[in-house]
Image (cartoon, coloured by chain):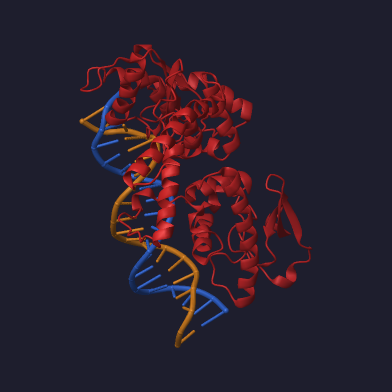
Chain colours: A red, B orange, C blue
Amino acid sequence: MRLRTPKIPRSDHPEAPVKVHDPLLGINFNMRRKMVSIADTEVAELWVSRGGTLAYSAKSGVLPAFAGKRRSVPQDEIYRRDAQSLASAILKLRETIGFSPSVRGWCYIAEEHFHLTKGEFGSFSDLLVEMRKSGLLPLDICAEDGARQWYNDEEIDPTPEKHAQYVVEVMKHHCATYRPISFWSDKDVYIQLLVEKIDLVQLWKEIAGRFHIPIANARGWSDLHCRATMMRRFRDWEDRGKKCVLLYCGDHDPAGLNISESMMSNLAELKDAQKVNWHPRKLKIHRFGLNADFIEAHGLPKLHNLETSSGGDLSHSSHRDHTKPYVQSYLRKYGKWKVEANALVVRPDAGRKLLLDTIQKYLPLDAPDQFRERLSTYQRDVSDAMRATLCKEFNLTPL
DNA sequence: TAATCCAGTGCGCCTGGGCG
DNA sequence: CGCCCAGGCGCACTGGATTA
């Protein structure tokens, strides 16, 4: 079915503006509803914003009229008002998400919350760039590309008084964050977290940090360095009597399950590597997250195909890898569907709760508070030591 | 006719399919 | 089954085509 996108003269809008309410955001979109015939017997409901030319396919009704088009002065007014409304919604969503996704990530989020269609992803990406350039949205509404970051920026110190105050604040900070003992020293376990996609690192690194759990993106098959670094940490803590646990979260598709099932043998292959010398035989690998039970419980959207990025479909017998054991066992066990990690990112609250529930199987949720309590004595000691050192260094009289 | 739209192109990073 | 590398992506730029 192909939607026509006719030019609708402004005078042809008999309907009064309709406030389209998003219950999740508590935000209204001012839209006009227009019934447009698609075929002789079919009618589609199109949403247009205050009339005028339909800038894009109006399937979702979220894209402002005239966006991405050359605009007359009145058209620009309409565009700016609608774009402002959308910007408010995006900013509100940013608060609930808790981090800045990539432009592509925003498309998935808009798909979930604004019912943006896949076909509108390109237009929505362009719109985000346009709104960031024009100042309607802050530049950092999208994640900064770490690979393009600046180095060696010159920093100019302020007045001596302000600089001295800054140095004192830094000293206080170092006293407050003094940590001569490990979070794990009084625990029975030691945990590390490995994920398949960078978005999951963004989603979880704050919680993992709170529990002092190292987290990394394995990018599918982990490389030797990633594994060796993880194994050295496990080795050191196992030597101190800890039960070691690797939490792993990957996509729910044939390749994702294949990777997690291969994790133990992948690690075992490095047991004799230089500066590793550790066998994972006692390691517990706990795959969590995009498992069938969680997907069912939260009604995560399933994709009813096994399409790969190259366009093939592993569920078709014509696919080269269709007969491979990992594909066939997946098809037998689950059928022709998959769930990608983006499904978790667009539901950040459920995603964060999932990680907390998983951590809770091994640690009490107040473990970070308990650790701060343990540290407070040491931090008082370092404050005293700092005071004594400063007195000695600057010939001050102790209070 | 000036403004600007837009398809095409280039670049480097990221991802994960599938080759060896 | 490890990991190479093709393709996807975000972004910027260009110049012929289109439009106010």
Q: Position of residue A61 (x, y in %)?
A: 65, 55
As rendered, which of A174 and A305 lies closer to the eye? A174
A153 is higher (above) or lower (below) than A8: above
Percent position (x, y) of residue A52? 66, 69
Residue toward you, A228 or A130: A228
Q: Is residue A321 left or right of residue A119?
A: left
Residue A83 seen anywhere in this rendered image of the structure: yes
Residue drawn at the location 30% of the way across and 23% of the way down: A232
Seen at 51% across and 18% down, the residue is: A362
Q: Nearer the viewer, residue A31 or A328?
A: A31
Location of residue A46 by image quarter: bottom right
Left or right: A211, with A79 as reference point: left
Q: Is residue A290 visible?
A: no
Picture coordinates of residue A249, whole percent (x, y) = 46, 28
Tally the numbered discs: 0
Residue at (49, 60) in percent of width and height: A129
Image quarter where the C terminus of chain A lies is top left
Q: Examine the image and state in which quarter residue A172 appears.
A: top left
Front-most of C1 and A129? A129
A284 over B14 or under it: above or below: above
Question: Is A373 rendered above or below residue A120?
Answer: above
Residue A64 appears at what percent x and percent y?
62, 61
